[in-house]
Image: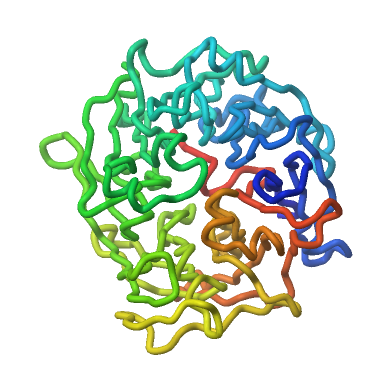
Amino acid sequence: LEIVYLPCIYRNTGIEAPDYLATVDVDPKSPHYSQVIHRLPMPHLKDELHHSGWNTCSSCFGDSTKSRDKLILPSIISSRIYVVDVGSEPRAPKLHKVIEPNEIHAKCNLGNLHTSHCLASGEVMISSLGDPQGNGKGGFVLLDGETFEVKGTWEKPGGEAPMGYDFWYQPRHNIMVSTEWAAPNVFKDGFNPAHVEAGLYGSHIHVWDWQRHEIIQTLQMKDGLIPLEIRFLHDPDATQGFVGCALSSNIQRFYKNEGGTWSVEKVIQVPSKKVKGWMLPEMPGLITDILLSLDDRFLYFSNWLHGDIRQYDISNPKKPRLTGQIFLGGSIVKGGSVQVLEDQELTCQPEPLVVKGKRVPGGPQMIQLSLDGKRLYVTTSLYSAWDKQFYPNLIREGSVMLQIDVDTANGGLKLNPNFLVDFGKEPLGPALAHELRYPGGDCSSDIWI
């Protein structure tokens, strides 16, 4: 692995510049190690690039005509889709096609695009959080994987993915699962705790019939609020996976039960901390990203507010075992504005993180694992409006990309002190870096069938 792609965002930062795709050199032998070596600016302002996916992946394995040479960049706010050519020159991506929001609105009646996965059919499927007006009637946009024409919706006419956010499919069981965040109109300008009380944030996952394109079961999370990232085990025969519930800060296992329908159970709970000097009297961990190693042995997740990344051994998926934990900033560091009054896990507040002389603002958010499972890459931005609210320093100083060394034999996480990409020093000013993608596919882009 020599390079990584990640979107950098200027929306909500006060800098009038377009979001861009950064290419970072992650080869320790390179003279440009841990530097941005290329930037591809988008042609518009304020798109809010977010997640990305491939034109083709392991679901098309064995088809030699397919090559993973286009990166799909959907915008969570503008609803534009950028198709980026990373095949011609992997170290200098270029724009291949722009799909305008009005085409998605007209053909699909959807907006606010999130997760992109390629399908074995050769199509690309992108989840949407709402309709063009920002209401919580989500769904799935289908693109042709060669021409990138918008073909319409994946779900049947009249169907919808309520508050649609993330999804993962498993054709061997004829199943797709999707999750919920909130209507775009609810989350887009920031987090309002009153909206939680009003029931405007998601608490369900939806089980879809993969061939019939319709919901067959809706599962209420067990004490779970805002189920965001969802992952089946990578083993295509597996009938289980995990979902991270952000606000309730727990991990829930979903699985096919003996009756042949699907169930959920809570398997990890991160306790809230009683605090002073914060927006609420109790601070949740806020699990914002989860990841499974390719061999399905370890589960990783980030607590964006508490500031730690955790590693669990999931050899027994019903009873995950904590094997590694590392603090990388967060809201409860010593000397900050928040005082922890009661903590079920820590005896003292963690030290601020300083890497290569930079005190790291924000907390760990998006994570990506190398294919051999030994290097975990981390970025610190969640979504520009929430960054601004929870970590104003991130807006002023920019986010960072860090790298953690993983002990794959016994478990354990250790910061690599020589790796730091400081997006606070970008040419146009501090930027917010988000989801990480490897040129050859990775733990969260690829689905085996």
Give percent across and percent down for residue 400: 68, 63
- Residue sitting nearer the eye, 34 or 12: 12
Q: Quick one: quadrant of the C terminus? A: top left
Q: Decide if residue 368 is in sight here.
A: no
Residue 303, above or below 348 = above
Q: Is residue 207 left or right of residue 71?
A: left
Q: How many marks?
A: 0
At horizontal 27% and vertical 40% (from top left) the residue drawn is: 204
Residue 9 horizontal side relative to residue 206, left or right: right
Nearest to the observer: residue 57 or residue 344:
344
| Percent position of residue 45, x then y | 73, 35
Q: Is residue 429 left or right of residue 55?
A: right
Q: Residue furthest bottom?
A: 347
Residue 266 appears in the picture as rendered? yes
Location of residue 104 by image quarter: top right
Front in this rendered view, residue 320 or 387? 387
